């Protein structure tokens, strides 16, 4: 089955969505831990907000991770569907 045939099926997109959501949540948590570990440990929510989300940083923070998650989900699903 070719890639174009796979993306036409409904099960492909359901599986892609499942994988993408789990990967997105994982990558957001890991990214926050790397970027703001000391602020997370001290529970300083204002510092976490300033470092990652204020002044439009939230768009770059989430959009890049969302795009990577969708691409990863599509790749894994395409590889596993026969």
Image: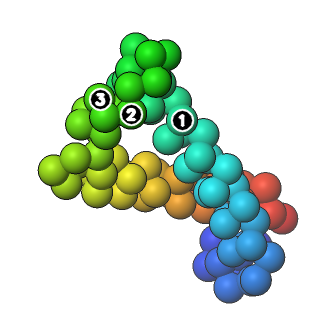
User: In the image, is residue 21 above or below residue 1?
Assistant: above
Residue 63 position by quadrant? bottom left
Q: Is residue 74 visible?
A: yes
| Of the pair 5 and 50, the residue shown nearer to us | 50
Q: Is residue 78 visible?
A: no
User: In the image, is residue 48 above or below residue 21?
Assistant: above
User: In the image, is residue 38 above or below residue 5?
Assistant: above
- Secondary structure at numbered mark 1: helix
Q: Closer to the N terminus: mark 2 or mark 1?
A: 1
Q: Please state the horizontal and vertical placement of residue 18, each as a whole percent of the image.
A: 72, 61
Q: Please state the horizontal and vertical placement of residue 33, each as a whole percent of the image.
A: 47, 24
Name the residue: 84% across, 65% down.
82
Residue to which mark 2 is pinned: 45
Name the residue: 22% across, 47% down.
54
The span from disc 1 to disc 3 (Cα, nearest Å) is 16 Å
Camera-side mark, 1 or 3: 3
Q: How is the image coloured?
A: rainbow
Residue 20 position by quadrant? bottom right
Residue to which mark 3 is pinned: 47
- Secondary structure at numbered mark 2: helix
Residue to which mark 1 is pinned: 29
Q: Please state the horizontal and vertical placement of residue 13, each as a whole percent of the image.
A: 69, 74
Relative placement, left or right, of 66 versus 50 is right
Relative placement, left or right, of 62 versus 25 is left
Relative placement, left or right, of 19 versus 44 is right
Residue occupying the far left of the picture: 55
Graded by Cα atoms within 10 Å as few (under 14), some (14 to 19) or many (20 or more), the crowding at tag 2 reads few
Quadrant occupied by the N terminus: bottom right
For the residues bearing labels 2 and 3, Cβ distance under 8 angstroms: yes
| Of the pair 44 and 82, the residue shown nearer to us | 44
């Amino acid at each position: 089955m070719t890639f174009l045939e796979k993306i036409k099926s409904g099960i492909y997109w359901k599986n892609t969505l499942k994988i993408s959501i789990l990967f997105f949540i994982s990558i957001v948590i890991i990214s926050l831990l790397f970027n703001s570990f000391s602020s997370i440990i001290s529970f300083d929510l204002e510092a976490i907000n300033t470092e990652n989300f204020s002044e439009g940083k939230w768009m770059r923070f989430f959009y890049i991770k969302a795009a990577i998650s969708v691409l990863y989900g599509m790749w894994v699903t395409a590889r596993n569907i026969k």
